Amino acid sequence: MPAKNLPLPFVCKKHPASGAGGVVVTNHPLGSAAGHEMLAMGGNAVDAAVAALLALTVVEPMMVGIAGGGVSHLRLPDGTHVVFDCLSQAAGSARADMYQPVSDHLPDYMDTAVRLNLVGPAAVAVPGNLAGWCAMHAQHGRLPFGDVIAPAIRLAAGGFRVTSYLSGNILRHAEDMLADPEIAGVFLPGGDPLAVGTHLVMPDYAESLKLIRDEGAAALHGGALGRALVDRLNTGGADAGSVSLADLAGYVPRQREAIFSGYRGFEIAGPPPPASSGVHVAQMLNILEGYDLAAMGYDSAERLHLLMEVIRVGFEDRRAASGDPDFVDIPVEHYISKEYAADCRARLRDVGGSGPVPPGYESNSTTHITVADRDGMIVSATHTINGLFGARFMVPGTGIIPNNYMYNFDPHPGKALSIAPGKRVPTSMAPMIVLKDGRPAFALGLPGALRIFPSALQAIVNMIDHGMTPQQAVEAPRVWTEGGHVEVEPGFAHHVQALTARGHDVRVVPHIGGGMNAIAFGPDGAMTGAACWRADGTVSALGGGLAEEGVAFHI
């Protein structure tokens, strides 16, 4: 790897933290604190991850909830990798023609009449987050579940201070939320968005969490919370949802095998389909392996052009074959082979340019956590309720905000991503773990919809090819394209002229993707966590520990 601390064209806005007892990084300080509490109690990384995710459903309610979906990637102390697919899926009664599309063309291709697939009961898919988190904890956690959910209950019942991040997102969708008295009563009391610093208490949700503490996932997947959800979905009249109590009771989180690939002596592990990252991060790294990126230099138009071309090729293949592997045949081994990467290099262009991009959608509104403990367990997990505040209503008396995952399906029948009963949508979520000589080197992930896995790719390249520290890698400026226009963050704005001269339609945007976080692993057991400026990301590292056995204080 290149030498560390090379001169870079940006200055980090946050600072890392290190500890040998474990590290928790989430996109909210109280989420990280909840995970830290588990490590301090003697829990492991799974205890900390589940506690953090449950706490985030309280303090980051616009991004994640128990009625959402996501992907958790675990590396166990024995070196085994397991991926928990907790993604939402279409109900058993869902139909390919259940919505009325408003257009066959961009930019309205995914939209339907009266926004049925975006806002309200008909937008809700069968959730998987709570079932997945409970299954993950039951199999690999160390502490009692009551201890793990306690921080979330405490935050909901006792309250927390509203951040500018939360307040701004309430304002963004205030009009939709005001249409539902339940969610408006919590986040827009009196019709105005909660101000920064407001002490927010969520007593109904605290009671729901207590029921989950006592009954586990069954409280939602067949129990009283599930009945309340289905009852609310059925109040929509012609706009009623299709999720039934049988759908909830029958949901099963899938355990899948991670995808492994090699890059410059490192081993890259990512989730398999329906997630795209394991396949296409491997594919794109294989293509890049044919070029000396370090010699190009991090801050060069030549390197940015190459990245954009490689990302474009990755998206072309993702569109050709992606989705739920129970419904779509995805040639994984072909895409991640070194031989195919050689063929892909022939598709790279010296001069860029925009082309037609088939329609698709994933929400930017997601959260990611990275957790590791002193015993070698790692959790990299990305979870969501899809859009900001999901379907933008709340189940009465429960505090639960349902997802709006049905918007991710193609509303046109007969397409690759059309709706089918039990089908899970593809996702760009990229909870990645990178190894060197069989040992963990770093783990990372981020929110950001279609920009997730290309951003994760760039962070991996930043550390391996450009010798960046974890903090530098997650904060570094990013680029993105899906094959149409290209986007650059302000840190690369000085390359706009050079990239335009190479045929790119360049747009400078405030940020690409969301708040990335990462943990790097040193040879001496030390772990360093990093979180970037694009969210309320916070690192909590545990050092020290309990007294040596047998030590007592005598007066």
Image: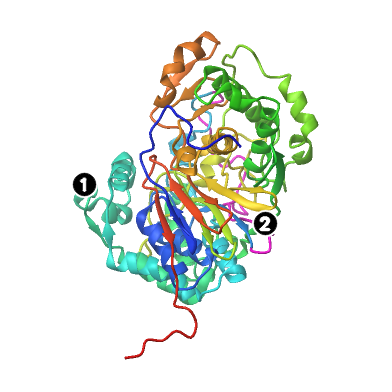
* 91 in magenta: yes
Distance from Cα at disc 1 to Cα at disc 2: 46 Å
Q: State the residue lying farthest toward the front.
A: 555
Question: Is there any visible trace of residue 213 in the rendered image?
Answer: yes
Q: Which residue is mark 1?
A: 192
Of residue 156 and residue 311, the one placed in the foreground of this image is: 311
Residue 81 in the image: x percent, y percent? 67, 56
Q: Secondary structure at mark 1?
A: loop
**Which residue does the image show at 60% across and 23% down from the upper left?**
295
Query: Mark number for residue 81?
Result: 2
Residue 393 in the image: x percent, y percent? 38, 51
Residue type at the position of mark 2: His
- Please identify the quadrant where the C terminus is shown: bottom left
Magenta stretch: give its range.
77-105
Residue type at the position of mark 1: Asp
Question: Is there any visible trace of residue 240 in the rendered image?
Answer: no
